[in-house]
Amino acid sequence: MSYTRQQLGNEFFIKSHDILFEQGITDIEINVHDWENTKCFFYNGEKSAIPFDIFAASFYLLSRYEEYLPQVRDEYGRFLATESIAFKYGFLHQPVVDIWAYKFKAQLQKQFPNFHFPERTYSIKPIIDVPCAYNFRLKGIMRTIGGIVKDFFGLKLKTLYNRFAVLFGFKHDPFDTFKYIINKQKQTKFKFWFFFLIGGYSTYDKGTNPNNKAFKSLIKHIADYCHVGLKVSFFGIEDIGVLKKEKERMESIINTSLIATRQSYSKLNFPKSYRNLVELEIKEDYTMGYVNQVGFRAGSCTPFLFYDLDYETQTPLMINAYHLMDYALLKYRSLLDKKKALNEIISEIKEVNGQFVPVFHNYTFGNVNRWQGFKELFNIILDSAHEEA
């Protein structure tokens, strides 16, 4: 096999694009073409065994090359789905890198029929994001009084009633859905990942006091059944010193090394966010994805190692991109439309035997109207792992 500009003989030849031989980052011209059931770019002509340089195209998407370039950002400084080539050219809904890999495999099998390829199977990795464990409980005296005053003068009488009912023990806190989620965990062999926010109170993060004994005990309890990671606070994303404190705080609660993180607001600053995680020897991250769009930000449903484009090095940090957040389903009005969108992405991932990473929040499973039907959607995800693909 050869990967060069010119074919050497009658070998399995893939004509190379320049991107993998360059240093530094430049604004590369991308021309997207249809390719059977999908799309691709970096067309390399008919002489090649495959009409596109899928290595260069995969590298472009997985390294998030486009996110290093100057872009329009949202109010939180996040890269927008609408700025991505996947959205602009209509292939955000497909795990194109995995689809290309299967096309490559098919061509290789023609050339080398005796070669045995390893098989993989569809799997799920549900994420439970916990920015705030309780709506009314464990808020401290000042925040509780502030909440009561706000409800009273805002004429939110129902909220005021619920707040007092929870505080006096007559009602269950609406965000406290942990028992329900643990029962769901017991029904599947695929481990859930919980990400708890334990940073300080700020404009962006309004979590529970990390020094509260009841909150620590909740995290320990969840860790008995599920994996527990750190939800990095908004200021922890920017400041490695803050991140280090949060990491150490979480490790002291779970009594083991912190393996994985998820950043607040799904915000990533390339490449600084990931470099900080590498420096602190965090092994996995679950931030890669779009809050308001269902799809494949990195073009794949397979975990991959972060490649630092500036330093031209592969790092030990494993990126687990997520493909759907509960918020992205809110734009579909009916439960039927939500189910359709969910089943479509499950179907895309099953086609390539990939790993489906959905993100739900603890409050999603409460009784608030906007989240009605989401328990059913979560069940569809759990059931999908036990059906034949």
Image (cartoon, rainbow, N blue to C red):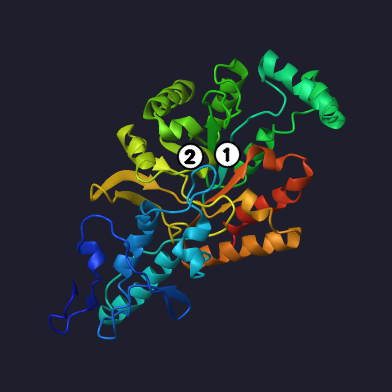
Q: Quadrant of the N terminus?
A: bottom left
Which residue is located at x 42 percent, y 29 percent?
A: 243
**Element assignment for label 2:** strand
Judging depth in this view, the residue of 342 and 162 nearest the camera is 162
Residue 27, picture quadrant: bottom left
Judging depth in this view, the residue of 216 and 146 nearest the camera is 146
Judging depth in this view, the residue of 225 and 263 nearest the camera is 263
Q: Which three-letter amino acid code belongs to the residue tagged 1?
A: Asp
Q: Which three-letter amino acid code belongs to the residue tagged 2?
A: Arg
Q: Quadrant of the C terminus?
A: bottom right
Q: Nearer the N terminus, badge 2 or badge 1? A: 1
The spot of residue 223 in percent (x, y) is 53, 31
Q: From where the camera sits, is residue 27 visible?
A: yes
Which residue is located at x 71 percent, y 52 percent?
A: 376
Instruction: Find out whether the residues at labels 2 and 1 contact each other: C-beta distance under 8 Å.
Output: yes
**Which residue was labeled with disc 1?**
129
- Left or right of 33 on screen, residue 76: right
- Left or right of 295 on screen, residue 46: left
Q: Give the class, few, some or many, for how many residues have Cα within 10 Å of label 1's Cα (few <14, many ≥20).
A: many
**Element assignment for label 1:** strand
Residue 232 against residue 138 in the figure, above or below: below
The numbered dot on residue 300 is: none
The numbered dot on residue 262 is: 2
Residue 384 against residue 106 in the figure, above or below: above
Q: Kindly report the distance in space between the C-alpha atoms of the residues bearing marks 2 and 1.
A: 8 Å
The spot of residue 258 in percent (x, y) is 41, 31
The spot of residue 213 in percent (x, y) is 59, 16
Which residue is located at x 60 percent, y 58 percent?
A: 384
